[in-house]
Amino acid sequence: MKSRYPRAFTIVFVLAFLALQLIVARPALAAPGDVVADVMTPEGATFWPLGVSPSVAFDGKYLYYAEYAGHVLHRIDTPPAGGVYNANNEITIGVIGIPSGIMALAYDAGRDAFWVTGGDGLSVYLLAKTGVAVLMFTIDPVNGRPGYSCTPGNTCTESKLAYDRADDTLWIGPDAFPRLYHYQTYPDPTGYAVLANTPFIDVSVPPNDMTAECGGYSIVSGVAVGGDHLFIGAGGCARYFEYTKSGVKVGSVAMAAMSIGDFECDNVTYPVSVIWIKNSFWGEIRAYEQPAANACRYGG
């Protein structure tokens, strides 16, 4: 029987129907914790000093990183999903105003700038995309970090940083330490950091520790926030962890093992929301799928 629809109309209808199915039933690129994207920076497998870096940031379009206590901000394109790609469209921006160099980065979408911890482990700056930094405050090594002590063998000036746009605060963790400190973005009258109402959370106190999942230890090696919860990584542990801002462990997600340098959230680049993680020891940045869509939004 002859169709009542012209052939051209039928073809267009079929193509439109298939396109609609792809939109409605498009599968996620991966499962929570799986690698969605992977990019090698120009430093590649170089170890020291260029490849070693505990910093990564994402501004909604580009990835940023710096060398260990470095004075150059690097910007690259986000890579396509799937596979391992070399960095594209790299530009370098000289940094002015941070004598000790950049240690950790966190993008603040409201200010369109980066919060930075310095290479001395105590200074905190606001860094413009032009490379000009302004010292915002200094952390008192005793009163500003209650209970802190550096474990022998750790790099005591290395820190991890996340900006929380929900209440305009900062989460800063000394590397490989089980306590994550919480600060206001403004100083006290003497220029020192002001601890927030919840001054810190601990990741090593049962039942909110990582010990069982990480083979006997609980530490902070990377942190990100962009919503109700914190996302924390422990160096050498093949999982990342979700905590409330009062320190209650919500859960953990298995991930491909990586030497964790820093976390940053991205819910706009791919069909699934991801956490960018910088490898501490060479020039690689991976995107791991978040536990749920928009669990952690970019920019704080």
Image: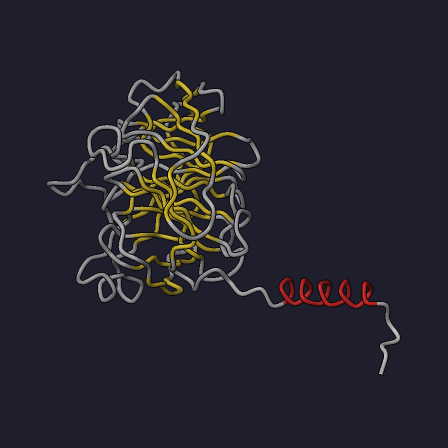
Position of residue 300 measured from the top left corner of the image (x, y, whole percent)? 50, 43
Answer yes or no: is residue 297 visible. Answer: yes
220 is higher (above) or lower (below) than 189: below
Near-viewer residue (257 or 208): 257
* 225 left or right of 153 in image: right
Position of residue 53 measured from the top left corner of the image (x, y, whole percent)? 29, 35
Which residue in the rendered view is the most extreme toward the bottom? 1
Near-viewer residue (247 or 211): 211
Q: Quadrant of residue 181?
A: top left
Position of residue 139 measured from the top left corner of the image (x, y, whole percent)? 32, 31
* 147 left or right of 23 in image: left
Give the mark count: 0
Answer yes or no: is residue 199 visible. Answer: no
Which residue in the rendered view is the most extreme toward the right? 4
Position of residue 179 measured from the top left corner of the image (x, y, whole percent)? 28, 48
Near-viewer residue (229 or 50): 50
Q: How is the image coloured?
A: secondary structure
Name the residue at 60% across, 68% down.
Answer: 25
Near-viewer residue (5 or 201): 5
43 is higher (above) or lower (below) than 229: above
